[in-house]
Image: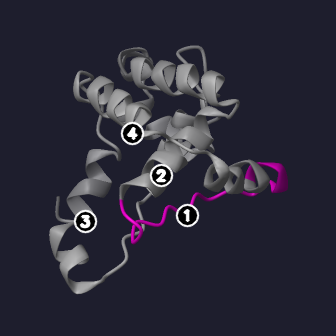
Amino acid sequence: MPLCEELGIGFVPWSPLGQGFLTGKINTTTKFDSSDFRAAFPRFTPEALKANQALVDLLVQIAARKQATPAQIALAWLLAQKPWIVPIPGTTKLHRLDENLGAADVELTQDDLHEIERAASEITVHGDRLPQEILKLSGR
Protein backbone atom coordinates (compact mmCIF):
# COMPACT_ATOMS: atom_id res chain seq x y z
CA MET A 1 0.00 0.00 0.00
CA PRO A 2 2.79 2.48 0.73
CA LEU A 3 4.23 1.78 -2.73
CA CYS A 4 0.85 2.47 -4.35
CA GLU A 5 0.71 5.77 -2.52
CA GLU A 6 4.29 6.67 -3.37
CA LEU A 7 3.85 5.90 -7.07
CA GLY A 8 0.34 7.31 -7.38
CA ILE A 9 -1.14 3.93 -8.24
CA GLY A 10 -4.80 3.35 -7.52
CA PHE A 11 -5.92 0.30 -5.57
CA VAL A 12 -9.18 -1.56 -6.23
CA PRO A 13 -10.05 -3.87 -3.32
CA TRP A 14 -11.26 -7.29 -4.40
CA SER A 15 -14.78 -8.03 -3.22
CA PRO A 16 -15.14 -4.99 -0.95
CA LEU A 17 -18.39 -6.34 0.49
CA GLY A 18 -16.93 -9.76 1.28
CA GLN A 19 -19.01 -11.60 -1.34
CA GLY A 20 -22.10 -10.11 0.26
CA PHE A 21 -21.26 -10.88 3.89
CA LEU A 22 -20.70 -7.24 4.88
CA THR A 23 -24.16 -6.30 3.61
CA GLY A 24 -25.74 -7.89 6.67
CA LYS A 25 -27.93 -10.09 4.48
CA ILE A 26 -25.98 -13.30 5.22
CA ASN A 27 -25.96 -15.00 8.61
CA THR A 28 -25.55 -18.45 10.16
CA THR A 29 -28.91 -19.59 8.82
CA THR A 30 -28.07 -18.69 5.22
CA LYS A 31 -27.98 -21.68 2.91
CA PHE A 32 -26.27 -21.28 -0.44
CA ASP A 33 -27.52 -23.10 -3.51
CA SER A 34 -24.96 -25.55 -4.89
CA SER A 35 -24.61 -23.30 -7.95
CA ASP A 36 -23.56 -20.36 -5.73
CA PHE A 37 -19.75 -20.23 -5.66
CA ARG A 38 -19.85 -19.08 -2.04
CA ALA A 39 -21.08 -22.53 -0.97
CA ALA A 40 -17.45 -23.72 -1.26
CA PHE A 41 -15.83 -20.72 0.43
CA PRO A 42 -14.32 -21.38 3.87
CA ARG A 43 -15.53 -17.99 5.08
CA PHE A 44 -19.11 -19.09 4.53
CA THR A 45 -19.14 -22.20 6.68
CA PRO A 46 -21.63 -21.94 9.55
CA GLU A 47 -18.76 -21.78 12.06
CA ALA A 48 -16.96 -18.98 10.21
CA LEU A 49 -20.18 -17.04 9.71
CA LYS A 50 -20.91 -17.23 13.42
CA ALA A 51 -17.38 -16.16 14.36
CA ASN A 52 -17.31 -13.31 11.85
CA GLN A 53 -20.76 -11.97 12.71
CA ALA A 54 -19.25 -9.49 15.17
CA LEU A 55 -17.87 -7.47 12.27
CA VAL A 56 -21.28 -7.30 10.59
CA ASP A 57 -22.92 -6.41 13.91
CA LEU A 58 -20.56 -3.44 14.15
CA LEU A 59 -21.47 -2.28 10.63
CA VAL A 60 -25.19 -2.70 11.40
CA GLN A 61 -24.82 -0.62 14.58
CA ILE A 62 -23.01 2.23 12.81
CA ALA A 63 -25.39 2.03 9.84
CA ALA A 64 -28.37 2.56 12.14
CA ARG A 65 -26.76 5.72 13.56
CA LYS A 66 -25.91 7.03 10.11
CA GLN A 67 -29.23 6.07 8.50
CA ALA A 68 -27.35 3.94 6.03
CA THR A 69 -26.96 0.27 5.22
CA PRO A 70 -24.13 -1.96 6.45
CA ALA A 71 -22.89 -2.19 2.85
CA GLN A 72 -22.73 1.59 2.62
CA ILE A 73 -20.74 1.78 5.85
CA ALA A 74 -18.26 -0.84 4.62
CA LEU A 75 -17.79 1.02 1.33
CA ALA A 76 -17.66 4.44 3.02
CA TRP A 77 -14.92 3.11 5.32
CA LEU A 78 -12.84 2.09 2.30
CA LEU A 79 -13.49 5.43 0.60
CA ALA A 80 -12.31 7.23 3.76
CA GLN A 81 -8.95 5.46 3.82
CA LYS A 82 -7.12 7.08 0.91
CA PRO A 83 -8.35 8.90 -2.20
CA TRP A 84 -6.62 6.33 -4.41
CA ILE A 85 -8.50 3.38 -2.87
CA VAL A 86 -11.52 2.79 -5.06
CA PRO A 87 -13.88 -0.05 -4.14
CA ILE A 88 -15.91 -1.40 -7.02
CA PRO A 89 -18.55 -3.75 -5.65
CA GLY A 90 -20.10 -6.09 -8.14
CA THR A 91 -23.84 -6.46 -8.49
CA THR A 92 -26.42 -7.59 -10.98
CA LYS A 93 -29.24 -5.60 -9.39
CA LEU A 94 -29.94 -1.94 -10.10
CA HIS A 95 -31.26 -1.26 -6.60
CA ARG A 96 -27.99 -2.61 -5.13
CA LEU A 97 -26.01 -0.35 -7.47
CA ASP A 98 -28.03 2.62 -6.18
CA GLU A 99 -27.42 1.47 -2.60
CA ASN A 100 -23.69 1.09 -3.20
CA LEU A 101 -23.44 4.52 -4.82
CA GLY A 102 -25.07 5.96 -1.70
CA ALA A 103 -21.89 5.08 0.20
CA ALA A 104 -20.26 8.15 -1.32
CA ASP A 105 -22.75 10.30 0.62
CA VAL A 106 -22.09 8.64 3.99
CA GLU A 107 -19.87 10.81 6.16
CA LEU A 108 -17.81 8.89 8.66
CA THR A 109 -16.26 11.05 11.36
CA GLN A 110 -12.82 10.40 12.78
CA ASP A 111 -14.59 8.92 15.81
CA ASP A 112 -16.53 6.56 13.53
CA LEU A 113 -13.35 5.51 11.77
CA HIS A 114 -11.55 4.93 15.07
CA GLU A 115 -14.51 2.91 16.38
CA ILE A 116 -14.47 0.69 13.29
CA GLU A 117 -10.71 0.23 13.40
CA ARG A 118 -10.66 -0.49 17.14
CA ALA A 119 -13.48 -3.00 16.96
CA ALA A 120 -12.12 -4.64 13.81
CA SER A 121 -8.70 -5.04 15.44
CA GLU A 122 -10.34 -7.08 18.21
CA ILE A 123 -12.05 -9.46 15.78
CA THR A 124 -10.21 -12.47 14.40
CA VAL A 125 -11.69 -13.24 11.00
CA HIS A 126 -12.28 -16.96 10.52
CA GLY A 127 -12.07 -18.86 7.24
CA ASP A 128 -9.97 -18.22 4.15
CA ARG A 129 -11.42 -15.85 1.56
CA LEU A 130 -11.17 -18.55 -1.09
CA PRO A 131 -10.98 -22.35 -1.15
CA GLN A 132 -7.46 -23.77 -0.84
CA GLU A 133 -7.56 -25.07 -4.43
CA ILE A 134 -7.96 -21.55 -5.75
CA LEU A 135 -5.36 -20.14 -3.37
CA LYS A 136 -2.83 -22.74 -4.56
CA LEU A 137 -3.50 -21.79 -8.19
CA SER A 138 -2.84 -18.15 -7.37
CA GLY A 139 0.46 -18.97 -5.65
CA ARG A 140 -0.70 -18.08 -2.12
Earlier in the chain: of badge 3 and badge 2, it is 2
Helix, strand or loop at label 2? It is loop
Residue bounds of the magenta highlight: 82-96
Q: Amino acid at mark 2?
A: Pro
Most distant residue in the front direction: 110
Q: Which residue is mark 4?
A: 110
Q: Amino acid at mark 1?
A: Ile
Residue 16: numbered disc: 2
- Frontmost of labels 3 and 4 is 4
Instruction: State if disc 2 and disc 1 touch (CB < 8 Å).
Output: yes
Mark yes or no: residue 2 visible.
yes
Earlier in the chain: of badge 1 and badge 2, it is 2
Instruction: State if disc 2 and disc 3 touch (CB < 8 Å).
Output: no
Earlier in the chain: of badge 3 and badge 4, it is 4
Q: Which residue is mark 3?
A: 138
Mark yes or no: residue 49 visible.
no
- Frontmost of labels 1 and 4 is 4
- Distance from disc 1 to disc 4, alpha carbons, whole Å, reads 23 Å
- Frontmost of labels 1 and 3 is 1
Q: Which residue is mark 1?
A: 88
Q: Amino acid at mark 4?
A: Gln
Q: Using a 10 Å C-alpha cutoff, classify the residue at mark 4 as few (fewer than 14 neighbours), some (14 to 19) or many (20 or more).
A: few
In percent of width and height, residue 107 lies at: 57, 45
Instruction: State if disc 2 and disc 4 touch (CB < 8 Å).
Output: no
- Distance from disc 3 to disc 2, alpha carbons, whole Å, reads 19 Å
In percent of width and height, residue 34 lies at: 60, 37
Question: Quarter holding the C terminus?
Answer: bottom left
Residue 35 in the figure: left or right of residue 43? right
Earlier in the chain: of badge 4 and badge 2, it is 2
Q: Amino acid at mark 3?
A: Ser
